[in-house]
Image: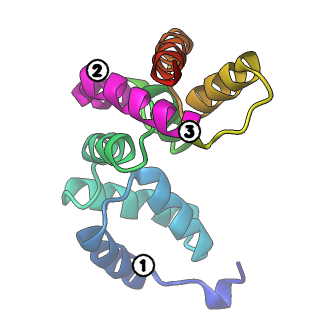
Amino acid sequence: MDSKYAVSFEKALKRLQNLCARQEKCTWDIMLKLKLWGVKNEEVQKIVSMLVDEGFVDDRRYASMFAREKSQLNKWGSIKIASALRAKKIDESIIKEALLELQPKFDRATLENIITTKAKQVKAKSPSDLRAKLVRFGLSRGFELEHVVKTVDMVMKSNMTDEA
């Protein structure tokens, strides 16, 4: 960004304090925003440190909230959540902590629910085609392969008994 359009240190800090007070952000989000605004690299580190010290930014709190939100609202599995957090440069130990907060029973119930719903919507030429589509769908939502396969088999078995 052209230096004459760059945001000043004080203005960037104030903007980010307001933003972080309204919405949870991680340090990576803040750094990207500062670079977009054309803030100098040495000032970027200083602003990020100040926001962390003042409690405006906390990657642990962000990861925990992100994991809960994506699990409950978007029906994502733990693999997809972890991948999204890694993309935001969150430390691996923080990701593990955030995923431990999720309830495994809720994870299985969610998977069963989305697979059952998807099975009713999918058009398939054969039972094996339906199974393949449902497994791909479960994996794309970030659930573990073994859980997806077991759930798909269970849903398909219960659908066959319902039709008989």
The image shows residue 49 at horizontal and vertical percentages of 33, 55
Chain part drawn in magenta:
95-119
Badge 1, how many Cα within 10 Å: few under 14, some, many 20+? Answer: many
Q: Find out whether residue 105 is within the magenta segment.
A: yes
Residue that label 2 marks: 104
Residue that label 3 marks: 120
What kind of element bears circle 1? Answer: helix
Left or right: where 1 falls relative to 38: right
At a point 27% along the width and 40% down the height, the residue shown is: 64
Establish if 88 lies above or below 51: above
Indicate which disc, 3 or 2, sits on the residue closer to the N terminus: 2
Indicate which disc, 3 or 1, sits on the residue closer to the N terminus: 1
Q: In the image, which disc is placed on residue 12? A: 1
Residue found at the very far right of the displayed protein: 125
Main SS, magenta region, reads: helix
* Callout in the foreground (3, 1): 3
What kind of element bears circle 3? Answer: helix
Residue found at the very far bottom of the displayed protein: 4
Establish if 88 lies above or below 35: above
Left or right: where 63 falls relative to 74: left
